[in-house]
Image (spheres, grey):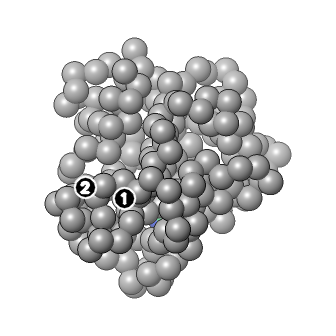
Amino acid sequence: MVVIGIAMLQGARHAHIGAIQRAANELSMNIEVVELRTAEDLQTQAIDALMLPGGESTVMRLRGNDVASRLLPALFSWMRENESRPVLATCAGAILLADPQDGGEPLVDAEIDRNAYGGQADSFESALDCGFPGIFIRAPRFGEVHNPIECTLNGEVVGVRKGNRIALTFHPELSEDSRYHRMLLEACA
Ligand code: GLN
């Protein structure tokens, strides 16, 4: 049984839970999804991999650093202590990895610029160069990166990887194609 933790701070959480369950069915894998709200949730439940949904990184930082939760520093410590554990971070989640703002090393090697395509009205859907349906919602944009993922948007980098950590500026959980969620599960094997 593979245990997938999901940060429940804010944002597109339930779509990610649906997508990872779909990916597990496609791979005939047994998974358990653990919803993480506080630092204690992470201490009491051992997870094999982590999903960081999109939403609003400012709200996630406020909620996740609040004394009632402290989930965010706990997640950053878990990732630094478990360097090779798979992580899938999307949009606001990618912003948190690239720019943790906790005085420590970034969790992926990339510069990132919030809301770089504009606001809500400038959200868009466009097929990526690999054919994946790219759904960009108030999306950030990467600056200089190490290890971009192969799939780009008209040649532009929309994902980076550091070992088994993947950070994407689009929302794979909102499309039918579960390939990025399958990658997370395959990396657990
Ligand atoms: N604009 C959001 C932020 O700055 C990210 C948007 C998203 O996750 N869809 O956090």
Instruction: Identify residue for label 2.
Output: 175
Q: Nearer the viewer, residue 63 or 133?
A: 133
Residue located at (61% from left, 21% from top): 45
Is residue 168 left or right of 93 when viewed as pictured? Answer: left
Q: CA distance from mark 1 to mark 2?
A: 8 Å
Q: Quadrant of residue 26?
A: top left
The number of numbered badges drawn on the structure is: 2
In the depicted structure, whether residue 41 falls above or below residue 126: above
Give the x, y percent position of residue 63: 70, 54
Residue located at (25% from left, 44% from top): 178
Q: Nearer the viewer, residue 139 or 84?
A: 84
Decide: marks 1, 2 in contact (CB < 8 A)? Answer: yes
Residue located at (56% from left, 51% from top): 108
Label 1 sits on a secondary structure element that is: loop
Give the x, y percent position of residue 44: 67, 20
Is residue 19 left or right of 164 when viewed as pictured? Answer: left
Q: Nearer the viewer, residue 129 or 31?
A: 129
Quarter holding the C terminus? top left
Residue located at (28% from left, 29% from top): 24
Q: Amino acid at mark 1?
A: His
Q: Amino acid at mark 2?
A: Ser
> Is residue 50 shown to the viewer in this render?
yes
Neighbor class of circle 1 (other Cα within 10 Å; few <14, some 14-19, many 20+) is many
